[in-house]
Image: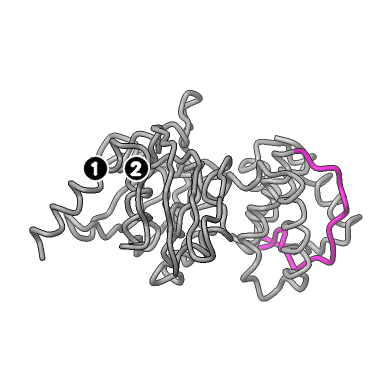
Amino acid sequence: MSKFSNLLRLLILLKSKKRMKTKELADNLGVSERMIRKYMDDLAEANVNVESIPGPTGGYELIGYDYLLNLDLSSEEAISLQIATTYLKESSNFDLKYQLKSLNDKIKIINERCNQLEDYSDNIVIKPKSVNLDKESKFELVIQSASISKKKLIIKYNSVSSGETERIIHPYGLITRNNLKYLVAYCENRKKELTFKLMRITQVEVLNEKFNLPTSFSIKEFMKNHLGLFHDENYNLKLLIKKPFSQSVSEGLYAENQEIQWIDKETIIFEGQMSGKTDIIRWILSMRTSVTVLEPEDLKKEIKEELKKMMKTI
């Protein structure tokens, strides 16, 4: 990890835990206590206000900070900044959250790879809003902190199939899909990696016991093959889209290589390569009779089969 990334991880830990001792920070970040004190000196020079509280219950406490320097960021550092922006945006103690968001937006424009942080699907589709964002955000910072610290969690999870159960998990990381947040973790109860929807987590407790993240494990590769959230197969789409969806589709980005051709004032031809069959079908069906699938032929057949199944349930 770069020094910049470690500083941001340190801020996330302090924001989550409120107050932490030098040794605890050093253990979490995998550096020496001397390096933690050096980080504190660096933050002080940047006007980041981290207070040192003396005594048995003391430690470092983040009070808030004033500005970020204009640095030549690497892609990893830029992604770290995006993470920090996400977890500081709701803070009442952080005075410059709007300025930080503006800086983050500029960096995202310069470094487009940062955009992959929010959605590993490599495919942008119309996304539903979460019905309860409060539930998603309640434990998010605690889980992110545990993921950084490589600490196990005890969670209570309300599964659709089995109801609320208690599980011990190893939090590997958080991802976002269709505006819903998921935790990718190893579940000791099930003895395998699973995804947990954040809004179904009802309780979180951080354990002192640490876990090792397998070096061969990749969240992106895992999600490509589990729960239908991601899919490798690419489709070269060609759609004829009429009013009222033609205008909104022409204004959005749905595929990296997309092309829009206006046939008349109310009709467009959309072409582009997209992945994620489930999402593509959902998007096409959302436009109802305003869309005609021109290509590919196999996707047209699958949509027809889906419609037949729907007709039987009506």
Return the residue at label 1: 302
Among the 4 quarters of the image, the one containing residue 68: bottom right
- Asked if the stretch drawn in magenta spans residue 68, the answer is yes
The 10 Å Cα crowd at callout 1, few under 14, some 14 to 19, many 20 or more, is few
Mark 1 element type? helix
Judge by depth and name the residue closer to the eye, 152 or 76: 76
Q: Position of residue 251 (x, y in %)?
A: 58, 60
Q: Position of residue 150 (x, y in %)?
A: 52, 41
Which of pointers 1 and 2 lies earlier in the amino acid sequence?
A: 2
Return the residue at label 2: 277
Farthest-out residue, top: 216
Which quadrant: the C terminus?
bottom left
- Asked if the stretch drawn in magenta spans residue 200, the answer is no
Q: Give the magenta-colored segment's residue range.
A: 55-74
Q: Position of residue 296 (x, y in %)?
A: 35, 37
Q: Main secondary structure of the magenta part?
A: loop
Which quadrant: the N terminus?
top right
Farthest-out residue, front: 264
**Up-down relation of residue 93 to residue 167 (above or below):** below
For badge 2, the amino acid type reads Lys
Q: Total marks drawn?
A: 2
> What residue appears at the point 37 percent right and 44 percent down from the top-left corner?
294
Among the 4 quarters of the image, the one containing residue 200: bottom left
Q: Is residue 107 visible?
A: yes
**Up-down relation of residue 184 to residue 66 (above or below):** above
Task: Judge left or right: residue 301 versus residue 242.
Answer: left
Determine contact: label 1, label 2, CB under 8 Å.
yes
> What residue appears at the point 34 percent right and 64 percent down from the top-left corner?
202
Q: Position of residue 81 (x, y in %)?
A: 71, 51
Task: Judge left or right: residue 110 versus residue 206.
Answer: right
Mark 2 element type? helix
